[in-house]
Image (cartoon, grey):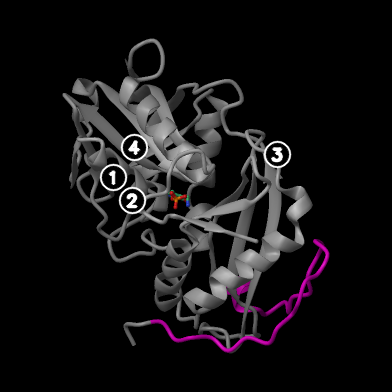
Amino acid sequence: AKSPRDGVFTEGGLQRFGPIQMCPSAGILNYGQGLFEGLKAYRKEDGSILLFRPEENAWRMRTGAERMCMPSPTVEHFVDAVKNTVLANKRWVPPPGKGSLYIRPLLMGSGAVLGLAPAPEYTFLIFVSPVGNYFKEGLAPINLIVENEFHRAIPGGTGGVKTIGNYAAVLKAQSIAKAKGYSDVLYLDSVHKKYLEEVSSCNVFVVKDKVISTPAIKGTILPGITRKSIIEVAQSQGFQVEERLVAIDELLEADEVFCTGTAVVVSPVGSITYLGKRVEYGDGVGIVSQQLYSALTSLQMGLSEDKLGWTVVVD
Ligand code: PMP
């Protein structure tokens, strides 16, 4: 079936954070049958708590569930479960400007399987953790290294959905890059080895002469919700945005490069190293990155008018 099946879930209720019981032959432990999501809740000055486009996370989990042979929560179930979890952990949502509550929904094959097959039972759970702002004192550029040997995703693989195995695949390249002092890895496509894909946990954008380009979604890139939102915000601010193949050579000519994701929001890139050659982007934070960062964060934190109805109040 092309559309995801709605899962039937037994309500497990709220539990204190801690170890959970798992059968040793659970599908997730043996065959990586698992998906996760990530979103944030922000506290406003008036004390209310805001989620940013949680139905988008629900839809992405549904798409992923179809690919991973799992039934999935409905959009309504997903959003309600997120709201209830946040409400139950209200005291952990940091004060305005001091960070956010990171929300991690998980969907997994929890039933027992011995031979390779989808698990017969599945579990949907959500845990949360307060997180500080990614940038403590204003935006700070990150330094990336382009990966030439390892790939994050291949055509026909699972790179386009948020399955746990995608993250196992990047651990090695990311550890090597971090040990060399880089912030993260920028991956190239595995066929031509010349088109940009994305970073380990964020999407990438290239700015040249007021045109903003980002690699098109073709099944090997995660369709980021921040990516989608930044495209709309940039267009509404008069920028031309192109979703297309972006070649590695374009990095040499770019005025600015930035990354987008729930964790990093909009993160300016200060330098990119490829085959030993380092390209630097100005000495600080690009004007377009700064402008889009401000526009998006003020929406997410409820500081600007939400004309598009992107925020959802929790209580
Ligand atoms: N790419 C990857 C591989 C990611 O893990 C993430 C984080 N979810 C993103 C991009 C950005 O997606 P989003 O904006 O929805 O957080």
- In the image: residue 177, left or right of residue 289: right
List the residue tagged with mark 2.
228
* Amino acid type, residue under disc 1 in the picture: Ile
Q: Is ligand 1 within 8 Å of the beta carbon of the residue shown at mark 4? A: no
Query: Where's residue 101, x and y in %?
Result: 66, 48
Q: CA distance from mark 3 to mark 1?
A: 29 Å
Q: Earlier in the sequence, mark 3 or mark 2?
A: 3
Residue range of the region highlighted in magenta in the rendering = 4-32
Q: Quadrant of the N terminus?
A: bottom left
Q: Nearer the viewer, mark 3 or mark 2?
A: 3
| Residue highlighted by disc 1 | 231
Q: Residues within 10 Å of mark 3 (few under 14, many from 20)?
A: some
Asked if 83 appears above or below 62 in the picture, the reply is: above
**Could you say which quadrant of the image residue 85 lies in?**
bottom right
Whichever of labels 1 and 4 marks the residue nearer the N terminus, that label is 4
Residue 256's place in the image compared with 126, above or below, is above
